[in-house]
Amino acid sequence: MSDVIQQLKLLYGRNGSYYKVVTDLEYLDLELSYRYFKSPFFEKKLKGLSSLKEQLELIGRGKEHLSPSDYFAWTMQNNFLQEVFGDGMHPELLKRAYEVLKLFCEQKTLTK
């Protein structure tokens, strides 16, 4: 699905409302990844977490229009950290979520 969103970004990059459209598409990509993460199927959860991590890496390298603080606010709004570290915590998800936390710290969006 991310490939489709990337193609839409290129398509909409040709008109004047580029920034708004691309930002909306980036949020859509986050939403789709989060829906995968919320799936009851473990493989989909891993796919969603991997996608969320990839998006944060792109944001951290300045390859997306969302800022690290936008991403962090979105994860807080969607209770992402509570989902990972809450009652349904799975060791494999926790291990992979460490990378997300590390990236948050590197971007100085996650503090004490």
Image: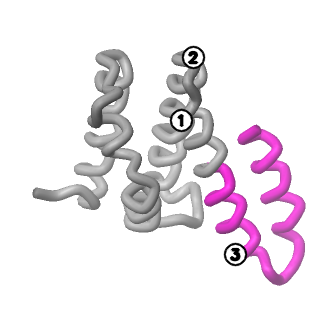
Residue 69's x, y, as percent? 38, 66
Mark 2 element type: helix
Residue 43 is labelled as: 2
Q: Is residue 79 above or below residue 95?
A: below
Pick the front one: 10 or 95: 95
* Mark 3 neighbour density, 10 Å: few (under 14) some (14–19) many (20 or more): some
The residue singled out by tag 1 in the image is: 38
Residue at image coords 16%, 58%: 111
Residue 81's x, y, as percent? 33, 45
Drawn side of residue 22 relative to residue 77, left or right? right
Q: Nearer the viewer, mark 1 or mark 2?
A: 1
Residue at image coords 29%, 31%: 87
Q: Earlier in the sequence, mark 1 or mark 2?
A: 1
Q: Amino acid at mark 3?
A: Tyr
Q: Are marks 1 and 2 in contact (CB under 8 Å)?
A: no
| Residue stretch in magenta | 1-29
Q: Is residue 52 above or below residue 61?
A: above
Mark 3 element type: helix
Drawn side of residue 43 relative to residue 91, left or right? right
Q: Nearer the viewer, mark 3 or mark 1?
A: 1
In the picture as drawn, the residue positioned furthest to the front comes out as: 87
Residue 108's x, y, as percent? 24, 59
The alpha-carbon separation of the residues under discs 2 and 3 comes to: 33 Å
